[in-house]
Image (spheres, helix red, strand yellow):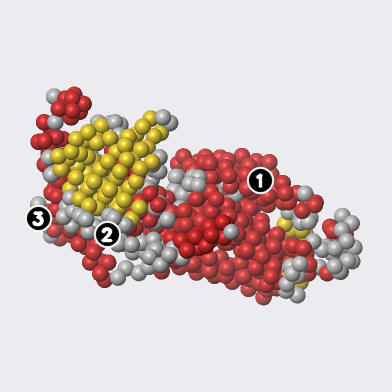
């Protein structure tokens, strides 16, 4: 009996998530609380304390949160606007490369070859001077600007061409897939000047702080949390505005929206750019924490994995994407430690199970739970009324 | 010398004081109906892979009129609507909205903003939104991305939505999801969405398809009450329904107008009897 009531209160607590305003504030609160506690436990407690959180865990959490941001970016475009992008990894990786170039320039003469003017891989390739697109990347603000501008422009150009010609559905998904694949092949080439196969790595510090230090790691985690929360709040503002309703309208009945006077392609392009920018920010935060960016990040498989996270969490709900990304990635970490080869099968099975049995993902379960709770509450109330006096319905009947 | 003259001539043509440069003409203008005709369609031709969907079609619709278009399947009714609303480009011909707006120069969104509303054959509403939000999205206002992001519902817009809700009789389900409405209610909601946009010209494609007799009757009342303030063009198969609302009927056959007149005139027209009504009689 006790466990049952505990379960029920747990359900009610979950049901809070469904209320548009309050539920998402819950999520923000939990995110902030967890990361702050983790940070404090890492910095303030001695290493032998049972409550100590290792720096490895801090970095892992930071990585998950970057993935959560990426999942949210995909959810905005897929869940709300019905555009299944299988190439969002491209924007993530481009943002990551922008940050990677900055970190690379910060190494200075501490590289293997001790060349202050050129990154190691360029010395190795016998290049004499810095390519033009590396200029200015030693400035943090400029690198961040580029890391936003390049993915943003790419998304704008791609979206403009695709949505104006009214490419939709599977064709669009295949094009996004081709986009990220083409970028992967391009970045694999040494001549591109982005480190080829090995990518950019061996970073030393960011903004003058040592990347290996605990303090920097914690700061990066907190920055990630903060930006995730900001992105979440701004996305929530968008989907709850009339703009958000137009976007859902475009998803469900594009022709109707167009004949009401909405230029649906403009809506799609700007939403695509917004989503790409969030993905780029996630990539920028990801690189300093994992310490490497290479063309593998462009791999089509990565982008598909993101779609699975969103599907598991529940598309069309922002918190669903975040929860889905966190859970699946945690499972991945655990699973690959136990049985490295089985993970892809597990992921595939997960996707099948979710699409067949949980078309609305975990968020769908929450919702069903919430509706059940509400019905149960109402049921109890009417029962009580019935025992005392006739209910309004019976009187009128 | 000659070329200089030519250049000067061109320059004079560009700088003529009695015309305006095309890019300076505002895209959104009020439609001019001083000649009492709101829609001029002349010599329209549309063909799909050799099939002539519209064949030298000529049609004029008066301002404030309720016009019914009838015709067998493939007579070009829906294609005609597509051309008017900018969905289909025609091969030749002209389509003017009032005397001053060339419909062929605009696309769907612009034409909708000029004041032409269209109801689809299959009721199409935004199922994931409530009835209220469906109407909100249809209101006549700026349809740009930024405007939508910053939009707040004003008091007069709220009143307009309430007014439309009472016209279409869906006040009680204002907070219901549109997807949960019955087929007939969806049809009404879609007509309501058109009304919320305050169009000059309403194109209504098969409004009573799948409706019960009672619902069809209410729809007929609704459409006749709209005529006058709006111009309404109804495409319908249901002859009973057409008879109950129509003042003027246009019969289409193989992409062109076969006959036009009152229902009685049309029904007694020998060509019409032969190709359309004759089949049923």
The answer to whether residue B197 shows anywhere in this view is no
Report the residue at 42% width, 55% height from top.
A263
The answer for how far apart the CA atoms under marks 2 and 3 are is 56 Å
Same subunit, labels 2 and 3: the answer reads no
Same subunit, labels 1 and 3: the answer reads yes
The residue carrying pointer 3 sits among few (fewer than 14), some (14 to 19) or many (20 or more) residues within 10 Å by Cα, namely few
Q: Quadrant of residue B182?
A: top left
Q: Position of residue B264 (x, y in %)?
A: 9, 36
State the SS at label 2.
loop
Residue B32: give its label: 2
Q: Nearer the viewer, residue A74 or B74?
A: B74
Report the residue at 28% width, 59% height from top.
B31
Q: Which residue is mark 1?
A: A181
Q: Position of residue B109 (x, y in %)?
A: 38, 54
Residue B224 placement, left or right of A234: left
Q: Nearer the viewer, residue B26 or A330?
A: B26
State the SS at label 3.
helix
Name the chain letter of the residue that bears numbered label 3. Answer: A
Q: Nearer the viewer, residue A304 or A5?
A: A304
Q: Position of residue A274 (x, y in %)?
A: 53, 61
- Sequence-first tag of 1 and 3: 1
Residue A396: give its label: 3
A72 vs B254: above or below: below
The residue carrying pointer 1 sits among few (fewer than 14), some (14 to 19) or many (20 or more) residues within 10 Å by Cα, namely many
Same subunit, labels 2 and 1: the answer reads no
- Are the two marked residues, 1 and 3, in contact with CB atoms closer than 8 angstroms? no
Q: Which mark is nearer the camera, 1 or 3?
A: 1
């Amino acid at each position: 009996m006790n466990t049952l009531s505990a379960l029920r209160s747990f359900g009610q607590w979950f049901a809070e998530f469904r209320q548009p305003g309050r539920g998402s504030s819950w999520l923000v609160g939990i995110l902030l609380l967890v990361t702050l506690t983790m940070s404090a436990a890492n910095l303030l407690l001695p290493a032998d304390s049972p409550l100590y959180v290792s720096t490895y865990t801090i970095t892992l959490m930071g990585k998950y949160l970057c993935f959560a941001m990426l999942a949210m970016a995909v959810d905005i475009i897929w869940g709300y606007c019905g555009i299944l992008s299988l190439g969002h990894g491209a924007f993530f990786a481009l943002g990551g490369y922008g940050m990677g170039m900055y970190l690379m320039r910060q190494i200075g003469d501490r590289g293997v070859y001790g060349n202050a003017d050129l990154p190691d891989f360029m010395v190795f390739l016998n290049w004499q001077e810095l390519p033009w697109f590396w200029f200015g990347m030693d400035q943090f603000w400029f690198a961040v600007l580029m890391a936003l501008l390049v993915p943003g422009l790419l998304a704008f150009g791609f979206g403009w061409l695709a949505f104006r010609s009214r490419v939709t559905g599977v064709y669009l998904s295949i094009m996004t897939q081709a986009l990220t694949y083409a970028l992967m092949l391009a970045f694999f080439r040494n001549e591109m000047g982005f480190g080829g196969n090995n990518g950019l790595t061996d970073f030393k510090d960011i903004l003058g702080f040592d990347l290996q230090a605990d303090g920097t790691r914690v700061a990066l985690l907190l920055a990630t949390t903060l930006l995730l929360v900001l992105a979440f709040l701004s996305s929530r503002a968008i989907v709850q505005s009339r703009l958000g309703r137009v976007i859902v309208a475009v998803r469900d009945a594009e022709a109707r929206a167009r004949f009401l006077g909405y230029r649906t392609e403009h809506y799609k392009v700007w939403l695509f750019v917004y989503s790409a920018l969030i993905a780029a920010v996630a990539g920028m935060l990801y690189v300093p924490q994992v310490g490497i960016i290479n063309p593998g990040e462009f791999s089509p498989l990565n982008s598909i994995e993101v779609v699975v996270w969103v599907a598991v969490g529940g598309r069309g709900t922002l918190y669903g994407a975040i929860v889905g990304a966190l859970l699946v990635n945690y499972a991945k970490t655990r699973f690959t430690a136990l049985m490295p080869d089985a993970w892809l099968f597990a992921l595939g099975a997960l996707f099948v199970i979710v699409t067949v049995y949980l078309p609305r993902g975990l968020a769908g379960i929450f919702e069903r739970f919430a509706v059940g709770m509400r019905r149960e509450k109402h049921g109890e109330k009417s029962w009580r009324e019935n025992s005392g006096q006739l209910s309004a319905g019976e009187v009128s009947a | 010398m000659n070329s200089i003259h030519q250049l000067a001539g061109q320059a004079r043509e560009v700088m003529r004081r009695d015309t305006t440069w095309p890019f300076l003409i505002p895209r959104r203008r009020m439609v001019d109906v001083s000649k009492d005709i709101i829609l001029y369609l002349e010599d329209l031709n549309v063909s799909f892979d050799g099939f002539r969907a519209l064949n030298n079609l000529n049609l004029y619709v008066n301002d404030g009129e309720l016009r019914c278009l009838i015709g067998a399947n493939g007579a070009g009714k829906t294609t005609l609507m597509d051309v008017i609303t900018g969905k289909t480009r025609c091969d030749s011909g002209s389509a003017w909205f009032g005397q001053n707006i060339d419909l062929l120069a605009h696309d769907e969104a612009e034409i909708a903003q000029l004041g032409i509303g269209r109801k689809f054959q299959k009721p199409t509403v935004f199922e994931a939104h409530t009835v209220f939000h469906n109407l909100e999205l249809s209101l006549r206002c700026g349809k740009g991305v930024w405007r939508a992001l910053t939009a707040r519902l004003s008091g007069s817009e709220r009143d307009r939505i309430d007014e439309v809700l009472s016209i279409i009789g869906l006040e009680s389900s204002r907070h219901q999801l549109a997807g949960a409405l019955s087929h007939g209610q969806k049809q009404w909601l879609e007509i309501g969405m058109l009304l919320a946009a305050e169009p000059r010209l309403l194109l209504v494609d098969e409004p009573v398809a799948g409706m019960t007799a009672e619902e069809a009757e209410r729809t007929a009342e609704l459409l006749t009450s709209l005529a006058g303030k709006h111009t309404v063009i109804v495409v319908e198969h249901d002859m009973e329904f057409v008879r109950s609302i129509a003042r003027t009927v246009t019969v289409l056959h193989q992409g062109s107008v076969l006959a036009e007149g009152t229902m009685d005139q049309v029904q007694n027209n020998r060509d019409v009897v032969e190709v359309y009504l004759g089949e049923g009689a």
